[in-house]
Amino acid sequence: MNHISLNNNFKLSFEKLPHTIRVIILKNDEECVCGKETLKNLLSFTEDNKEHLFKGRLQLFKSDGKIDIQVKKEFIGTVSHEVFKKALNKLH
């Protein structure tokens, strides 16, 4: 599993399941929160005008070429569209 380092010991990771992708947030290498979505919807999130993905504890917000990540309404890090998309493309 590839990890993308975020702020304060947080990491973003993706796990391929049979029909969906788990978007996982790790803190100190322990799973903190996750969300499930299809690969198609995750990729379209990076390309379309959609500005928000997921509801609940994990939320992704897109703006100005970056994706802001919130866990339990607290900002934990930012990743560029390119890095996010590159990680997803490795799951094909």
Image (cartoon, grey):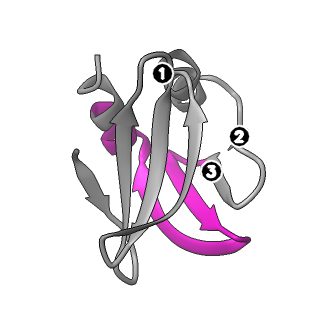
Q: Quadrant of residue 26?
A: bottom left
Dividing the image into 4 quarters, which one contains the C terminus?
top left
| Three-letter code for the amino acid on which mark 1 is drawn | Leu
Q: Secondary structure at mark 1?
A: helix
Q: In the rendered image, which residue does mark 1 sit on? A: 39
Which is more foreground, mark 3 or mark 2? 3
Q: Secondary structure at mark 2?
A: loop
- Mark closest to the chain's N terminus, 1 or 2: 1
Query: What is the CA distance from the residue labelled 1 to the residue labelled 2?
Result: 17 Å
Q: Residues within 10 Å of mark 2 (few under 14, many from 20)?
A: few
Residue at image position (56%, 58%) is: 68
| Three-letter code for the amino acid on which mark 3 is drawn | Leu
- Mark closest to the chain's N terminus, 1 or 3: 1
Left of 6 or right of it: where is 66? right
Query: What is the CA distance from the residue labelled 1 to the residue labelled 3?
Result: 15 Å
Q: Nearer the viewer, residue 83 or 39?
A: 39
| Three-letter code for the amino acid on which mark 2 is drawn | Glu
Dividing the image into 4 quarters, which one contains the N terminus?
top left
Expressed as whole percent of the image width and height from the top left, the position of residue 40 reads 52, 16
Query: What is the CA distance from the residue labelled 3 to the residue labelled 2?
Result: 8 Å
Q: In the rendered image, which residue does mark 3 sit on? A: 60
Residue at image position (41%, 55%) is: 79
Expressed as whole percent of the image width and height from the top left, the position of residue 45 reads 59, 29
- Mark closest to the chain's N terminus, 3 or 2: 2
Please say if 60 is above or below 89: below
Give, as a single range, the part of the protein colored magenta. Answer: 63-86
Q: Nearer the viewer, residue 21 or 78?
A: 21
